[in-house]
Image (cartoon, rainbow, N blue to C red):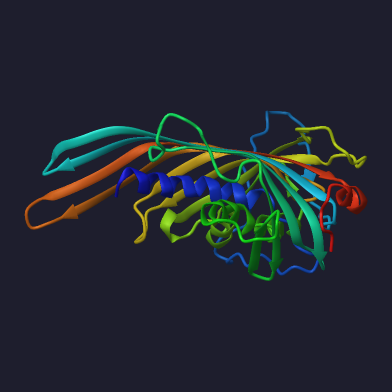
Amino acid sequence: MRVASCLFLAGAVGVAACGRLAPAQAPSAGAPSSGVAATEPLLTPLPRVASPGAVPQPAQVVRFGRRSVRVGDVALQNVQVGLELTTRYTQSGQIANEGQATMQRQQRRRIETLAVEGDRLSEARLTFELSRNQSPENPDPAALVVQPVEGKTYFVSRRGEEVRITDALGDIPPLDEFKLVSDVAENIGKPNPLAKLLLERPIAVGERLLVSREIAATLLGLRDQVGTVKRFELTLERLEPTPLLAPRASAEPPSDVAVFAARIETLPNDATPLELTLTGQVKIEVDTCRAVAAEFDGPVQMSTIERTRADVFQFSAAGKLSLAIRSDYDYLGAERLARRGAPLR
């Protein structure tokens, strides 16, 4: 496995996770239960040690809510993914080559809801205000290269699992643009599986939420080629005001956010040697279950061995993966959105 493959695998984790956490919606009021197996407890209280003679205080309890998506909803998202790798290639136990590899991705994008079917977003306008990429495969490996979607607007429509992407003129974008847009578009209009868990019952500050492997894989967009989820846990730490990234057009008061400490562990499987452990924070609006921020970083490693009749070859890589997303939500309303030239349905 070469450096480019390592970058793709580890980078795919960051891109997928950011995509899942950002535009996903809370489920409808009648949404089915999470389907967590009975053998895997959902909420586990952390032990509390009281001081001698102290009067026990009740833990602060948070009850999450939901709000249906509306025409005129706007999400502003800032995404950063970084990967630093040290690679080593050995032949018959001797080091044949060592190197360093760096990858970065930066995006600032705007998603505007143009149409709604039931309680789901069905059409959206997606604008990439900024999209840059640093990779060893670029002509200048140290430079952040402008990607072909930067400064462009696309339209995304969803009918069930079918997603249609067109450019500002109504045409199918070129393949290089289409792939970049698809990374974001595939999650637009999909429900956030984490919201199902948050809506099931009140959660006390200090409680730990053990997310099932199936829900974790769906939430993070982890497919077989980027490993198997071993553990994903969230611990509710506190409540705090919503951070605003930009002035809001809406007069709606911002919701408080719940701050969760997070830990993700994946293991290698038959499809990939990738293994990672990420820790960080996830911040979720209490009133809507929308994620407003997520930050993760931690070690990533992988190793492959190829045996031939003549020799044994081993490729290994180890380093650090970091990802961060900040989201700000606003409501323009259908009238103001129409003035921006959106073809409302």
* Relative to 273, 338 lies left or right: right
* Relative to 5, 11 lies left or right: right
Residue 250 seen from this side: yes
Q: Residue furthest left?
A: 310
- Which quadrant is home to the C terminus? bottom right
Which of the 4 quarters of the picture holds residue 251? top right
Taking the spot 37% from the left edge, 54% from the top edge, the residue there is: 268
In front: 182, or 9? 182
* Relative to 257, 267 lies left or right: left
Residue 2: give x, y in percent of width and height. 30, 46
Residue 261: give x, y in percent of width and height. 61, 39
Taking the spot 59% from the left edge, 58% from the top edge, the residue there is: 41
Taking the spot 61% from the left edge, 46% from the top edge, the residue there is: 234
In front: 162, or 338? 338
* Relative to 88, 313 lies left or right: left
| Location of residue 204 with respect to 246 vertically, above or below | below
Residue 10: give x, y in percent of width and height. 44, 46
Taking the spot 25% from the left edge, 38% from the top edge, the residue there is: 88
In front: 28, or 144? 144
Residue 14: give x, y in percent of width and height. 52, 45
